[in-house]
Image (cartoon, helix red, strand yellow):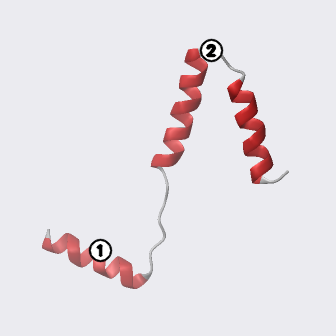
Amino acid sequence: MTTVELKNILIHKIAGINDKSFLSAIKTIIETKEETTIYKTTSEQQKRIEEGQEQG
């Protein structure tokens, strides 16, 4: 199963849910995932970040 297929299945299943508290829990899970995105930086980018932090 591809990521797109899985997303479509989840969208379809979520659309059929009418339980507000359950939908709220799903929303919380999704928002948590969005907040924990990790960005990979190059050594040059990391150096510039550190320089900026020292100036701030």
SS for callout 2: loop
Q: Residue furthest bottom?
A: 44
The image shows residue 5 at horizontal and vertical percentages of 80, 47
Residue 33 x, y percent position in the rendering: 53, 45
Q: Looking at the image, which residue is at 77% across and 45% down?
A: 6
Pick whichever of labels 1 and 2 is earlier in the sequence.
2
Q: Which residue is mark 1?
A: 49
Identify the disc placed on residue 19.
2
Residue at horizontal 45 percent and vertical 80 percent from the top: 42
Kindly report the distance in space between the C-alpha atoms of the residues bearing marks 1 and 2: 44 Å
For label 2, count other residues whose C-alpha is less than 10 Å away and answer few (under 14), some (14-19) or many (20+): few
Q: How many other residues sit within 10 Å of disc 1, few (<14), some (14-19) or many (≥20)?
A: few
Q: Quadrant of residue 43?
A: bottom left
**In the rendering, at what x and y percent does residue 13 appear?**
75, 29
Q: Residue 14, which numbered label?
A: none
Judge left or right: residue 31 versus residue 5: left
Q: Amino acid at mark 2?
A: Asp
